[in-house]
Image: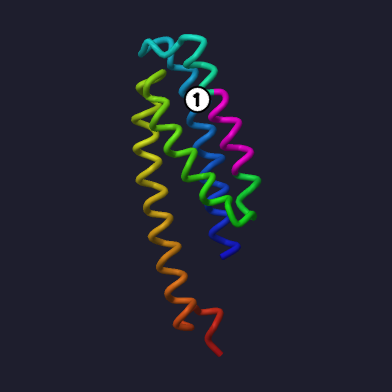
Amino acid sequence: MKGLRGVFAATLILESIVVLLALLVLPKFGDGATPAGIGAMLGLAVAMVVAAGLQRRPWGLSLALALQAVMIACAVFVPALGILGVVFALVWAGLLLMRRDVARKMARGELPSQRS
């Protein structure tokens, strides 16, 4: 499952980049350019980068999923973050389905690396 942890970490890094890029367009499209909104976005982006480094821990995936919930909850400050949170929640749902599929194949011995 090491490869999947790398995918999870890369997704978190990509997500933090998207959150930081949203800062650039925030003043033009919404009311989220308040100090609380900007602080929430910066804090969330930093937390995602830190969580990417913690994916090797047993609780790393739980932290990543908790950050998704926080991102959706940040819609209170910045509505665009809620939309981005839902989009990335769908991405995480796909990753979790992929993880389940790999775990099932691993248990049955059907992975190409398990064949002799």
Q: Is residue 46 magenta?
A: yes
User: Residue 95 falls in which quadrant of the image?
Assistant: bottom left
Image location (x, y in percent) of residue 27: 43, 10
User: Residue 78 falls in which quadrant of the image?
Assistant: top left
User: Residue 3 falls in which quadrant of the image?
Assistant: bottom right
Judge whether 48 appears above or below 30 on screen.
below
Judge whether 41 appears above or below 28 on screen.
below
Between 88 and 35, the one lying in front of the other is 35
Q: Quick one: quadrant of the C terminus?
A: bottom right
- Taking the spot 47% from the left edge, 79% from the top edge, the residue there is 107
- Taking the spot 51% from the left edge, 23% from the top edge, the residue there is 41
Secondary structure of residue under mark 1: helix
Q: Amino acid at mark 1?
A: Leu
Mark 1 is surrounded, within 10 Å at the Cα level, by few (under 14), some (14 to 19) or many (20 or more) other residues, namely few
Image location (x, y in percent) of residue 109: 48, 83
Image location (x, y in percent) of residue 52: 60, 44
Q: Quick one: quadrant of the N terminus?
A: bottom right
Mark 1 lies on residue? 21
Judge whether 58 appears above or below 53 on screen.
below
Q: Which residues are magenta?
A: 42-51
* Majority SS type along the magenta span: helix
- Taking the spot 36% from the left edge, 13% from the top edge, the residue there is 29
**Lateral position of residue 51 relative to residue 98, left or right:** right
